[in-house]
Image (spheres, rainbow, N blue to C red):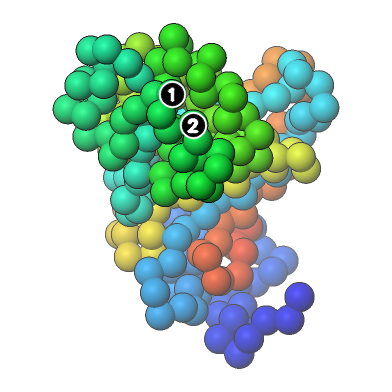
Amino acid sequence: MKHGKKYAEAAKLVDRTAVYEPGDAIALVKKAAPAKFDETVEVHIRTGCDGRHAEQQIRGAVVLPNGTGKTVKVLVFAKGDKVNEAEAAGADYVGGEELIPRIQKDGWLDFDVVVATPDMMGVVGRLGKVLGPKGLMPNPKAGTVTMDVTKAVKDIKAGKIEYRLDKTNIIHVPVGKVSFTDEALQENFNALMEAIVKARPSAVKGQFLRSITLTSTMGPGVKVNTAKF
C-alpha cells in the first residue's frame, strides 16, 4: 500500500522496532497524526484466541470514561411504554414493524447502534441480512438487547463501545480523538484493556495478548508493551 508524503513524515517519528509504554504511545500517536481533521485514535489488539471455536469468542461492551468524541445515533426497536422511555433517554429513532421496509427496501441506515427490547427481536431478526454484516445486530452480550432501554441509550450516548474478535482474531476499537488530552486517552485505553483482560476466555491457552497497536485514522501504528496486561 502506497502512503503519501504526510504519512511518510509521520512514520519517521515512530521507531518500528520499539515497544512503547501506553502513555508514551498515546503521546506519539497524537504527534504523528498527519491529517487536518480530528482523527480517531484506534486500538488494535491481536489475541491468542481461535475464534473458530465458540468458547474462544470475545464479545462485549465497555463505557469509556471520556466518551469517544463521536456523536452516536441510536435506533431503538420497542413497543408500548418502552417507546416513550427510549425517546426520553435520548434515542434518535424509535419504532417497530414499520421500520422494516424502510431499512430493507429503502436502504435506510442513518444510525450507528441498534437497541431492541427482547420482545422485538422477532421483528429485528428479519433484518439479520442487512444489520448482521454491518455489525449492527443487537446482542445481549453487548447490552443492546434489554428491557432497560434507558440505561442502554444513556450508556451508548456517554461513550459505550462494543468490542469483538474479527475473523483474524483481532479486536479493533476507537478510544477517542487526537484532540483529547493524553490523560483522557489514557483513561479510556485503561478502561478498555481492563475489560478485554477480564473477557479472556478460559479456553485460551498460552499468551492471550499477542500485540497491541495504537494508531490514528491516517497515522502510523505504534506498538504498545503488553507485559503489564
Quarter occupied by residue 63: top left
Closest to the observer: 190 or 77? 77
Closest to the observer: 54 or 28? 54
Whether pointer 2 and pointer 1 mark residues with C-beta atoms closer than 8 Å, the reply is yes
Please tell me whether mark 1 sits on a helix, a strand or a loop.
Answer: loop
Quarter occupied by residue 151: top left
How far across and down, in percent of the image, does residue 45 sit?
64, 44
Closest to the observer: 177 or 112? 112
> What residue is at 32 percent from the left and 16 percent from the top?
79
Residue 94 relative to residue 225: left or right: left
Q: Please state, as top left, top right, bottom left or bottom right, where the N terminus lies in the image.
A: bottom right
| Within-10-Å neighbours for mark 1: few <14, some 14–19, many 20+ | some
Closest to the observer: 222 or 161? 161
Instruction: Write down the residue under mark 2.
Output: 100
Instruction: Write down the residue under mark 1.
Output: 97
How far across and down, in percent of the image, does residue 183 sit?
32, 53
Residue 41 relative to residue 179: left or right: right
